[in-house]
Amino acid sequence: MTQIICSPSKYIQGHGEIRKLGDYCLQLGAKRAFAIVDPYIFSMYKKDILHSFEMNDIPLMMREFKGECSRNQVDEIVLELGLKDAEVILGIGGGKTLDTAKAVSHMADLQVVIVPTVASTDAPCSAISVLYTDEGDFDCYLPLKRNPDMVIADIDIIAKAPARLLVAGMGDALSTYYEARACRQSGAVTHAGGTGTIAAFSLARACLDTLLAEGESALMDVKQGISSSAVEHIVEANIYLSGVGFESGGLAAAHAIHNGLTLHEGCRNVLHGEKVAFATIVQLVLEKASEDEIAQAIAFCKKVGLPVTLKELGITSSEINKLMMVAEASCSQDSPMKNMPFEVQSVDVLEAILATDKRGY
Ligand SMILES: [Zn+2]
C-alpha cells in the first residue's frame, strides 16, 4: 500500500508575525497580493499589515470577510482577483475566512498564505475547505490541489482570543493520536490519499504528549493574557501537530461521532473541538482501551473544561431516540467510522455514548 504524508510547505509561528506578512510574501516571489481578513482583525491590525507590504513594495488589496464560505462567495472573489492580477492570496482570521482563502487559491490557481488568528481547530494546515450554503448550512468538503504554501501563527494574537477557543482546539487535537492509531491498526487510507507514515504517527503522538504536559498551564496563561512557552507549544500542537496528524494519520470514530452529534439540536452552541473531545472518550470506550488511558483522557478534559458528559454537551441522556439518530449517523456509509479496526454498529456507539456519560460524573 502506498504511504503518503502531506503538509503546508512552510509553518511559521512566533510573536508579532502579523507585522512580517509582507516579508513572507516577498519570499514567495509575489508581486501583488490580495488578503481576505476577519473584520475584528481588520479593525485592529489593518495598519500593521499594510505597512509590512509597503516596506516590501508589494501592492496589497484587502477585503473584509463577510457572509459565508460559500460557492457564491468564492466565485465572486475569484472574479475580483482576475481583474486585479494578484499572485498570492492571504486568509487572515478564523476558520471560514481561512477556508474561503484556500478555496479561492484552489479555483484561481494561486499561492495561498494562511494566518490563523485563533487555534480552535486543526484545519489551517490541511488541503481541505469546508463549504457552506449562503444560508450557513453545511454544503460539502472541497478537496484542494495542495496544502497551503505557508501557515503563519502569531502567538500574541492567538493568546488574546477567548480562552474557550484555545480549549476547543485542544479538544480537536486530543482525538488525533487515538484516531491515527485506529487507522494504523486498520490500514485505513487517510485524507492524504495513502496509508499513514511513521512521521505522521509520531506527530500525532507528540500532539497528545504536548496537550497532556502543557494544556492546563497554557490555559491558565491565556486567561491572564500571557503568551508563554506553554501557549506556544499548545498552538503548535493544535494547529500543526494535529493538522498534519489528522490529515495524514487519518480520522476514525471520534470524528464520526462528532459528525453525528452535529445533527443533535442540543449541541448547536457547542464548538467543533468540544464535541470531538467527548467523542474521543467514546472512541476509547468503544475500543475497550485500558482503564488508565480512558481515565487520563477524562481527567485532561475536566482540567481544561472540555465536556465529558451529555449534559455538558446540552443533551439530556433520556432522549434515547435522538441519541440513536446520532449513533446511526456516525455509522453512515462515508463516515470515518469505517476506518476503525473492527466493525462498529450504531447500537455499539449508543452504548459507548451512555457509558462515557456515566464515567463523566
Ligand atoms: Zn476536527
Image: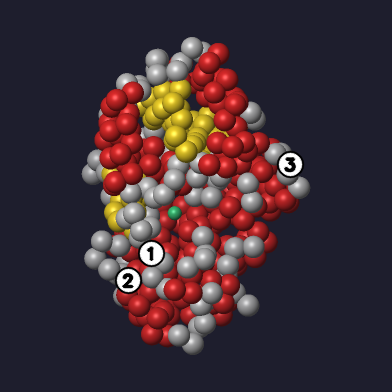
**Which comes sooner in the sequence, label 3 or label 2?**
3
| Depth order, front residue of 35/286 | 35
Please indicate whether residue 11 sits to the left or right of residue 344 in the image. right
Q: Note whether 82 is above or below 318 in the view shown.
A: above
Report x, y in % for residue 224.
76, 47
**Which comes sooner in the sequence, label 1 or label 3?**
3
Please indicate whether residue 279 sits to the left or right of residue 182 in the image. right
Residue identifier under label 1:
259
Q: CA distance from mark 3 to mark 2?
A: 41 Å
Residue labelled 1 has its Cβ within 8 Å of some atom of ligand 1: no
| Depth order, front residue of 127/184 | 127
Is residue 244 in view?
no
| Mark 3 Cα-neighbour bin, 10 Å: few <14, some 14–19, many ≥20 | some
- Residue at image coords 44%, 34%: 63
Q: Evaluate if marks 1 and 2 touch, with contact meaning CB atoms under 8 Å apart.
A: yes
Residue identifier under label 2:
329
Residue type, numbered disc 3: Ile
In the picture, the disc for residue 226 is 3
| Mark 1 Cα-neighbour bin, 10 Å: few <14, some 14–19, many ≥20 | many
Q: CA distance from mark 1 to mark 2?
A: 7 Å
| Depth order, front residue of 175/81 | 81
Q: CA distance from mark 1 to mark 3?
A: 34 Å
Q: Report which quarter residue 109 is drawn in.
A: top left
Give ligand 1's quarter of the image.
Answer: bottom left
Position of the C terminus by quadrant? bottom right
Residue type, numbered disc 1: Asn
Report x, y in % for residue 285.
47, 71
**Which comes sooner in the sequence, label 1 or label 2?**
1
